Structures are given as structure tokens and as C-alpha cells.
Amino acid sequence: MTVVFGSDHAGYDLRHALAAGFRAAGHDVSEVGATSDAPYDYPDAADLVCAQVLAGGTDLGVLVCGTGIGVSIRANRYSGIRAANCCTTEMAVLARQHNHANVLCLGARLLNLEQAEEIARVFLQTEEDTSERHSRRVRKLDGNFPAS
């Protein structure tokens, strides 16, 4: 699987550790955004990840900031991006299955490495549920409203 990891400065250490772990597990991983813990704006990191996901050059994106909220807000401004800020594995599973989320957002100030790794692992392994009820709702999320 091809995954792009991005972060601001607050998420740099967690992002870098996550990316290294997924690279070691055999995933094709790239990293964008902050290159250290020096100030780096989270919207810029979200823009870089979303551009790669939308271009089709990567299967899924993972964004990390202090809480996961800022990157989630920014990422969800893009048509075709469904970013989910997940704090548990159950949220990650449901975000993928029900919402067809293609970008995972994580909070470096809220999760330790072990928690973040497990959430990301589950997110990447979970397939979308393409049953009509979920597909219909995802079309609405993406602004493709069915005729009434």
C-alpha cells in the first residue's frame, strides 16, 4: 500500500515514527510537511497530503498535528477528501467502512506511539463497505446528491 504521511511541527515526531514503522512493514511511504519541530503550519501539511491523495499517487493519507482537529478541518475542505480524526481503533474501522475515509488524522498530544500505530494499522487494513446505504451517504458527503 502507498501511504503519504504529513504533519506540522507538533506532529513531527509521531509522524516520523509512524512512517518509519510502516516503511519497515513493507508499505511504500512518503513524508511531507514539517522537517523538524520548528514551527510549521498545519494547513500547509494538509494541503500537501490532500494533493497526493487526489492526484492518485497514493492510496491513503495520514495527517498528524497536536490534536488532529486542524488538519482534519483543512483536509475536509477538499472535494473528494474524507478525513477522519480518530482516537480509537473502532473510530478508524467505522471511518473506513461507513465513510470511506481516505485520510486519517491523529493528535500527537492525545495519543502515544503505540495507540497511534494501532489506529493507523487498522485504518490502512480496513476496506470500505460498498453496500448501497454507505455508498449513498458517501456520495452525499462528496456533494453528489442523488435526484429526488
Image: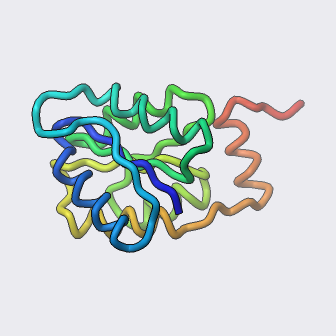
Q: Position of residue 22 (x, y in %)?
A: 36, 66
Residue 56 in which image quadrant: top right
Q: Is residue 129 left or right of residue 40?
A: right
Q: Could you say which is closer to the camera, residue 32 or residue 135?
A: 32
Name the residue located 55 percent from the left edge and 58 percent from the top edge. Answer: 96
* Residue at image point 43% right, 66% down: 90
Of the 4 image quadrants, the one containing the C terminus is top right
Residue sticking out furthest to the bottom: 25
- Spot occupied by residue 37 in the image (x, y as percentages of width and height): 11, 38
Q: Residue at x 70, y 36 (%)?
A: 140
* Residue 6 falls left or right of residue 126: left
In depth, the one of 42 and 107 nearer the eye is 42
Examine the image and state in which quarter residue 79 appears. top right
Is 89 left, or right, of 137 in this rendering?
left
Residue 25: x and y in percent read 38, 73
Above or below 15: residue 28: below
Q: Quadrant of residue 48?
A: top left
Viewer-proximal residue among 97 and 13: 13
Q: How is the image coloured?
A: rainbow
Where does residue 12 sit, x and y in percent of width and height? 20, 45
